[in-house]
Amino acid sequence: MRYLRHLNPTPGINDFWSEFTKPNPHRWPIIAVSFGIPIVAILTLAGEDQVALPAPPEVIYISTFDPDRTREEIIASNVANQERKEAREKLMEERAEVRKELYRQLGAATGLDTDEMARKIAEDEAREKAAEAKRREELLGRAGLKPDAPTTAE
C-alpha cells in the first residue's frame, strides 16, 4: 500500500489547475496547437480509404480445335490420340525392358544374383498391386459401389 501514495493523481491535478488559472497571454494558442497536432495526425492516419474491388480478369479461351467439328471428326481425333498414346507407352515399356536387361547383365558381371533380385522385385510389385486393389475396393465400398461396377456414368 505504500506504493499507492506515489501514484496519487491529486497533487498533479492541483498543480495543473494552479498553473492553468494563472494569467498567461499564450495559454489559448498553446492549447490549440497542443490539441491540433494530435487531432490532425489522427485524422490523417485514420482516414477511411475507399478501395474498389479489382476488375475481374478477362478470360480468353484458346481452342486448337475447330468449333464446327462433327461428331465423327471428334471420334477420329480421339482414336488417333489414343493410338499415339499407346504407341508411346509401348515404346516406354520396351525401353524399360532394355534398361532392365542391361542392369541384369551388369549385375551378373559383378557377381550379383540377378534372378533372386528379379524374384524379390516381382513379389514386391505383386504385393503393391494387391494393396492397391484392396484400397480401391475399400474406397468403392465406402462410396457404396461394387468393385465390379463401372465407375463412370454413361
Image (cartoon, rainbow, N blue to C red):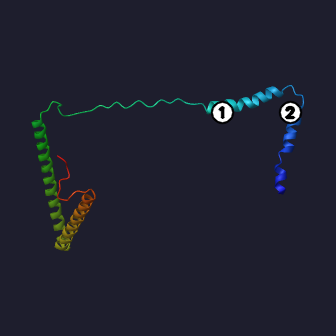
Say what secondary structure mark 1 lies in. helix
Q: Nearer the viewer, residue 42 or 118?
A: 42
Seen in the image, is 137 located left or right of residue 15? left
State the residue position of label 2: 20
- Residue 65: give x, y in percent of width and height: 18, 34
Instruction: Please name the residue shown 68% across and 29% down the image.
Output: 40
- Residue 75: give x, y in percent of width and height: 11, 40
Q: Nearer the viewer, residue 118 or 22?
A: 22
Vertically, is 145 above or below 26?
Answer: below
- Residue 107: give x, y in percent of width and height: 19, 69
Vertically, is 22 above or below 116?
Answer: above
Circle 1: residue type: Ile
Seen in the image, is 91 located left or right of residue 47? left
Vertically, is 49 above or below 130?
Answer: above
Instruction: Please name the residue shown 16% across and 54% down the image.
Output: 92
Sort mark 2 into few (<14), some (14-19) or many (20+) by Cα contacts within 10 Å: few
- Residue 134: give x, y in percent of width and height: 24, 64
State the residue position of label 1: 42
Instruction: Name the image quarter holding residue 145.
Output: bottom left
User: Marks 1 and 2, how far apart in space?
Assistant: 26 Å
Instruction: Name the image quarter holding residue 36.
Output: top right
**Image quadrant where one finds the N terminus:** bottom right
Instruction: Please name the residue shown 66% across and 32% down the image.
Output: 41
1 or 2: tag closer to the N-terminus:
2
Instruction: Name the image quarter holding residue 143.
Output: bottom left
Instruction: Please name the residue shown 88% across and 32% down the image.
Output: 21
Q: How many labels, in total?
A: 2
Circle 2: residue type: Phe
- Is the Cβ of the residue at disc 1 closer than 8 Å to that at disc 2? no
